[in-house]
Image (tube, rainbow, N blue to C red):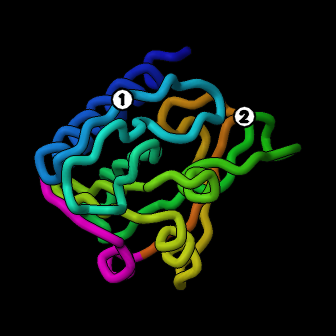
Amino acid sequence: MTLLVMQHIRASQRAEYLQMDGLKKTIDIEVEPIQQGARVCGDYRVTKNNSSNIIFRMGTKIEFKNDIRSQTTNRFYLEFESTNNNWWSSYESGVTKAAKEGCLVILGSGENNYVFTPSALLQLFNTKGRICGTRIGSNGNPDNLYTRGKIVTLENVEAICSFRYTL
């Protein structure tokens, strides 16, 4: 694993921790981390909900995504497909895979966090936007690893999200 990949993973883990900590301060829930591995969806699982917010049911998995560029572009990159062999083959990934597996998806942009139920996330994915892919070496990845995603506007994110909170 390259130094850039390790730095990207550490930064993502820190952002996910801050997003989870902010969520726990906003809604009285308890969570446990999910063991990570290839093609695993969800970062945490809800173990207890002491609030009246029914979105966060016991056993629900939560997938966090932090889009640093969204703070300046007012757009989010919603990954939906990956390859590790220069597109000879690909597999479903990212937020659409998480939603199809029943995860709540939380998109972070600075201090703002937008919570999506699976149906709301798929509704967001169906809004107008353009499809694009990552470039060689994005996030420190090897030359044969790429993702595809859809760019959606912050306006649509705010309009469709199921719940929002700030850090």
Magenta segment boundaries in residue numbering: 153-167
Whether residue 114 sits left or right of residue 58 in the image: it is: left
Instruction: From this view, report whether residue 146 is shown above or below residue 119.
Output: above
The residue carrying mark 1 is 32
Secondary structure of the residue carrying tag 1 is strand
Label 1 or label 2, whichever comes before in sequence order: 1
Q: Amino acid at mark 1?
A: Glu
Left or right: residue 6 compared with residue 20:
right
Quarter holding the N terminus is top right
Dots 1 and 2: beta carbons under 8 Å?
no
Q: Residues within 10 Å of mark 2 (few under 14, many from 20)?
A: few
Is residue 69 found left or right of 143 in the rendered image?
left
| Residue sitting at x 18%, y 60% | 165
Q: What amino acid is at disc 2?
A: Asn
Labelled disc at residue 136: none
Provide the secondary structure element on which disc 2 rests: loop
Label placed on residue 144: 2
Where residue 125 sits in the image (x, y, percent)?
A: 55, 73
